[in-house]
Amino acid sequence: MKKRLFSLSMIVGLALTFLLTGCSQASNENKKELTIWTFTDEAKYAVEKFKEKHPDVDVNLLFITNDNYVQKLISVLQVEKNVPDVFFVENAYWPQIKQIPRLENLSKEPYNAEEILAKQFPYIQNIEKDEEGIVRGLGYQGTPGAFYYRRDLTKKYLGTDDPKEVSELISSWDKVMEIGKRVYEESDGQVHALSSWSDIDIVESSNIKEPWVVDGKLVIDDVRVKELDLVKEARDTNVEAKYEVWGPAWTASMQKGSVMFYAEPTWGLPYIFEKNAPETAGKWGLAHGPKSFSSGGTYLAMYNKSQNKDLAWEFMKFYTTDEEFLKELAESQQYFLSNKEIDEELAPELTSDFLDGQKYFEFFVEAGEQVPSAPQSKYDNDINKLWTEKVNDFLNGRLKTKEDMLESFKTEVGHNFPEIEVN
């Protein structure tokens, strides 16, 4: 009898095992899969939140270091093998990537992405479109700029730390230059108005009217030519501190208090200033400078032969329109959004202790509306590097005049890009 009961229990157990295994396999087979490539840690947070709302989706998130990311992405798009369903692209590379004919047309049905763009800042909308006006990606981040200033320094040398008053005092480059010369003298050379010539470049490069290349020809916008005079004046009169951006002296100056103004975008708050000068909380403010500008940003795009377009679009919509997620992202991580409607809703209540209680979302909403739409070309990232190299040669005396610098720049562009006509 015991043997029979034991045999019966074994049979029942095996049956249950097969039944559960079968259910498990069926469950796994019903799981939907989405593959995403990224170069930024930001993606992990969004993916986790997306999975909470979509537990039936397995997300394969592949993180690739930024140095290798773009080339790998271009390679798989060109050969159309192992292409992810969704991929992140940094603003610097986006003009190049969005022209590759492997990105889904998001203007057409069922996407109708213009409905999402209508809620974004105008300058972001223009970046998301290709040369034919077709939406190829969605930006989830708003990146208008500000002049981050040390309140203790403006109080001492300008007599005020009020954001509106400081904004008026630096509303033109002439005013900035005048302040810089005076502050350097009064501080016995210990304090500079600007950290680097890049504080001028980041502003002026957002205000160009022509991209680097138009109809196959190199174009040097008048804004860039005039910028050379500004940076030379700033260098010769010690208005800028000659720091190398992202270098140790540059980051140390934020903690030290040897620079009054830094021109940086929204993400500069958590990733530059709070990170490098945590002990200076409460000593900072945001002011509008001579011109409105933006810098950086990241875009999401979809492979046009993806087998999971519905899921890919669901993730892209989630990252750009889901109110619950976006509000949590903004509030918990000080993340300024491309969706200006949510930014505006949060603006009256979001303040920063690091900025001495300033309503920073309110500031950036105002700034974002004023940002111009700077035109782009697929050559921008590479030519920008050449421009930076030649400006440094000019400022450090290796190229004696502005004319020498421009000629050397043209020659370098011609050597690197023989397909571009250089006059």
Image (cartoon, rainbow, N blue to C red):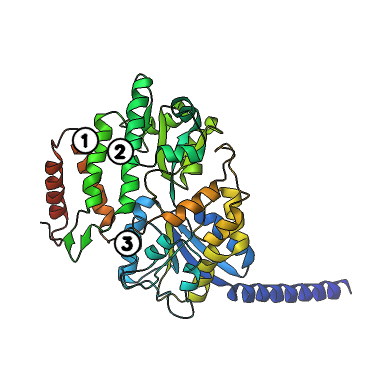
Question: Relative to 230, is 44 above or below?
Answer: below
Mark 1, residue position: 395
| Residue 39 numbered tag | none
Secondary structure beneath dot 2 equals: loop
Mark 2, residue position: 197
- Dot placed on the residue nearer the N-terminal end, 2 or 1: 2
Between residues 230 and 30, which one lies in front from this camera angle?
A: 230
Mark 3, residue position: 95
Secondary structure beneath dot 1 equals: helix
Residues at circles 2 and 3 in contact by the CB criterion of under 8 Å: no
- Which x, y percent locates residue 165? 48, 38
Question: Relative to 265, is 217 above or below?
Answer: below
Query: How crowded is the residue under tag 1: few (<14 C-alpha within 10 Å), some, or many (20+)?
Result: many
Between residues 35 and 203, which one lies in front from this camera angle?
A: 203
- The residue positioned farthest toward the right in the image shown: 1
| Tag nearer the camera, 3 or 1 | 1
Residues at circles 2 and 1 in contact by the CB criterion of under 8 Å: yes
Query: Which three-letter amino acid code belongs to the residue tagged 1?
Result: Leu
